[in-house]
Image: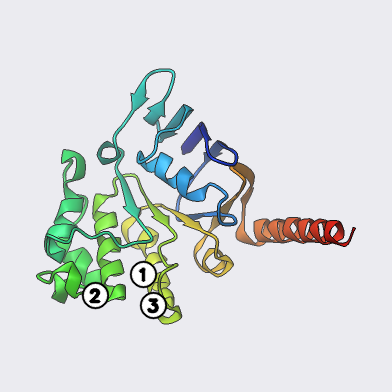
Amino acid sequence: MLHIDITKRLDRFSLEIVLDIDVPGITAVFGPSGAGKSTFAKILAGLCTPDGGRISFNEKVFFDGDAGVNLPPERRGVGFLFQEHRLFPHMNVFKNLSFGCFAGGRPPCGDVAEIAKVFGIDHLLRRSPASLSGGESQRAALARAILAAENFIIMDEPLSSLDDALRENLMGYIERIPPLFGIPIIYITHSREEVTRLAQRVILIEEGRVMGCGSPSKLLKKWRRTVSHQDQKYEGMDNQ
């Protein structure tokens, strides 16, 4: 169970997330650009500190403003896949993946060679990140996130910089992670296609607030009606 009750002042609004949710499989955090999704992801991973509140996962407290608890990223057991691949340039692929195993000093959660084979990068382990294609680099980053994940993986717009063919290929790898490794994924996106293809449930965020949580089919319809209503309102104002 993931419990979140936090606030964070942003430039245009305050991020105010109150949420209790089971997160097996893939949970999409969906909403328009600038809604606060990436800030939410960084707060969850420990890369950004909220102004107050509490975050816990399966009774493990990540953050508690009143109690003065704020675990650093390496102690949260969370893998993180950025939009940019962010492999360490001074390490080969094997060392990048191995680094994920021992983040925070905990024991490895998987075998590097085995996971590299699953992601089709076992022949690339001695290569430098600079020599990889975009798809190879993203698969290596994905494998590293799995090796770093004790509790769950956060993916922040991981496919937005890829072309259609690579996006399709990577989605195939992503959807296999929960059944193969038993690791939940929290997937940040503004792509309807990715939500429909990958997610079992959706958290809808607009202007820093949770507007709904449920199945993709129901939540996307709700969001479509909301956007349509807003567009009509704006169009009416323009005509005045």
Where is residue 163? Give x, y as percent. 42, 78
Residue position marked by numbered label 1 in the rendering? 173
Where is residue 62? Give x, y as percent. 37, 32
Quadrant housing residue 63:
top left
Q: CA distance from mark 3 to mark 1?
A: 11 Å
Q: Is residue 6 left or right of residue 71?
A: right
- Using a 10 Å C-alpha cutoff, classify the residue at mark 3 as few (fewer than 14 neighbours), some (14 to 19) or many (20 or more): some
For the view shown, which residue lies furthest in the right direction? 240
What residue do we see at 42% from left, 74% from top? 167
Where is residue 206? Give x, y as percent. 63, 48
The answer to whether residue 127 is visible is: yes
* Labels 1 & 2 near each other (Cβ < 8 A): no
Q: Is residue 44 left or right of residue 131?
A: right
Query: Which amino acid, by three-letter code, is at mark 1?
Result: Tyr
Residue position marked by numbered label 2 in the rendering? 120
Residue position marked by numbered label 3 in the rendering? 166
Provide the secondary structure element on which disc 3 rests.
helix
Q: Which of labels 3 and 1 is toward the front?
A: 3
